Image (tube, helix red, strand yellow):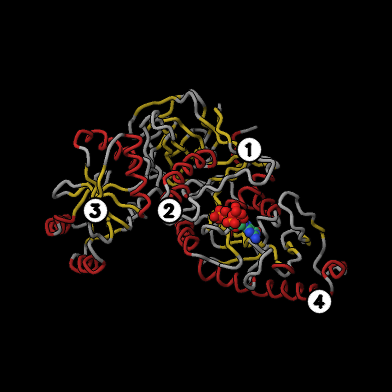
Amino acid sequence: MSLKKEIERRRTFAVISHPDAGKTTLTEKLLLFGGAIHVAGAVKSNKIKKTATSDWMEIEKQRGISVATSVMGFDYDAHKINILDTPGHQDFAEDTFRTLTAVDSVIVVVDVAKGVETQTRKLMEVCRMRNTPVMIFVNKLDREGRDPFEILDELEEELKINVRPLSWPIEMGERFKGVYNLHRNSLDLYKPSKQVVTESIHLDIDAAELNQHLGASLSDKLRDDLELITEVYPEFDRETYLAGNLAPVFFGSALNNFGVKELLDCFVEIAPSPRPIEAIEREVDPYEKDFSGFVFKIHANMDPNHRSRIAFVKICSGRFERNVNYKHVRFNRMMRFSSPTAFMAQKKEIMDEAFAGDIVGLPDTGNFKIGDTLTSGEELHFKGLPSFSPEMFKYIENADPMKSKQLQKGVEQLMDEGVAQLFTNQFNGRRIIGTVGQLQFEVIQYRLLHEYGAQCRWEPINLYKACWIESDHPSELEEFKKRKYQYMAHDKEGRDVFLAESNYILMMAQQDFKNIRFHFSSEY
Ligand code: G4P
């Protein structure tokens, strides 16, 4: 197959949702259709189940499972599908943001009873920033939920995107009859089943047979609803969807495998194949012959005796081959990989070649960090992997003076993996770790001990935000840094960061130093 055809047939995406909306269940059903698994229940939930407090075994289990389910690749019809998994727990939100930089589109799952929830809202902000095409699956129609029109309003308002239903539910809960598929003009009758694919009947909405299946009153209501949809919502337009401005909406029940095949069939038809990616130097087209890719995730080995890791590389252009020399741009050094892995279904296997859109896993002993670029030789730096200001901050202190080297190395490697962010105070050299949630501090402490034999202690520090600062007026910047010397830090790339103690202090700083720009993310 030609390079162009190989790349064109790829669909790389993530399923995102608020915990419990049905992401795991939907992913599993998608794999079932792809023949990647044969029975439901084979995909273990990649989440720390309903634990607000931390549970070490759960975290370790989660890490074990998530290597296997990080990327699930399978063939469906003529397409090669790559589903990238995202952690469900909100304390790992940064991980999810980074994964979203490696996908070409997303499917958002929403619970019909709960509507749009916090986590969905946050993840959609990231999708909007990148104009990622979005498809929505409204789940759990086998249960009582909200009125579908009301759900559509909420989706538009809360997710700030235009929507267009491509399927429409007929009743819900115990009375749920099925959906009318507007994309294919077919009536899909609901038959609760965890394994069997539902039969659908090709029926024009005006066909008289509709009454035989639904009865006169439901048929009339369906016709009225569809008329309203046509009046209120824009025609589905693929270009608008691809630009990230229109989300097609499907209704169904992942658990009962209902509406999933329709979603998948429409998905492979309209979802984008790999798209051009911005590098600082230029835009990189996936169909270019030369290989390029970037590391968006690093996964540490579960076995503390083998400190090897897997670097997940998203291929941005061309073909990646085993045992071929590629340039590690940050090191300006050629490297060769003898055992890169492909992710097929839930297995990792050594592969010989992969194409733009695919993810390859490279065994790593500490050469990579998040954002690193590999190319056939060109100097490229891909954009779009910013660090965001953490929400929580603590000083990290060495609790075992005999193991300071181990602590140093452990902290460095965990930060390269993107577990949290490190800031070094420019005034006193103390190190501050910033995270999204409390759980990350516990994970760091645990992993430092078990993987590096180092002990750390946390000490409180009262901070509100970390702001990356810049200015076109060097003297004002210098003046600011002098004035705020106790609150100036370097991030791990050595960039200047202002650690604001409170919103008020930040506002005052912004007011007093009008020529300084304060950014809440490291890429601006
Ligand atoms: P998540 O990954 O988004 O967190 O959600 P997950 O798929 O784990 O689903 C959360 C719960 O919702 C699960 O129940 C799952 O069985 C249920 N669920 C998913 N899709 C549907 C659906 O279409 N209809 C109904 N009625 N339920 C659905 P659980 O009891 O939390 O877990 P489990 O014991 O069933 O695994």
* Residue hosting label 4: 217
Marks counted in the figure total 4
- Mark 4 or 1: in front is 4
- Mark 2 or 3: in front is 2
Cα gap from disc 4 to disc 1, whole angstroms: 48 Å
- Mark 3 or 4: in front is 4
* Residue hosting label 3: 497
Say whether marks 3 and 1 touch (CB < 8 Å): no
Q: Earlier in the sequence, mark 3 or mark 4?
A: 4
Quadrant for the N terminus, please.
top right
Q: Is residue 399 above or below residue 351?
A: below
* Residue hosting label 1: 5
* Residue hosting label 2: 93
- Could you classify mark 3 by the number of other residues whose Cα lies within 10 Å: few (under 14), some (14-19), or many (20 or more)? many
Cα gap from disc 3 to disc 4, whole angstroms: 64 Å
Q: Earlier in the sequence, mark 4 or mark 1?
A: 1
- Could you classify mark 2 by the number of other residues whose Cα lies within 10 Å: few (under 14), some (14-19), or many (20 or more)? some
Say whether marks 1 and 2 touch (CB < 8 Å): no
User: Which secondary structure lies at badge 3?
Assistant: strand
Q: Earlier in the sequence, mark 2 or mark 4?
A: 2
Cα gap from disc 3 to disc 1, whole angstroms: 46 Å
Q: Position of residue 211 (x, y in %)?
A: 85, 70
Q: What amino acid type should be assigned to the residue bearing mark 4? A: Ser
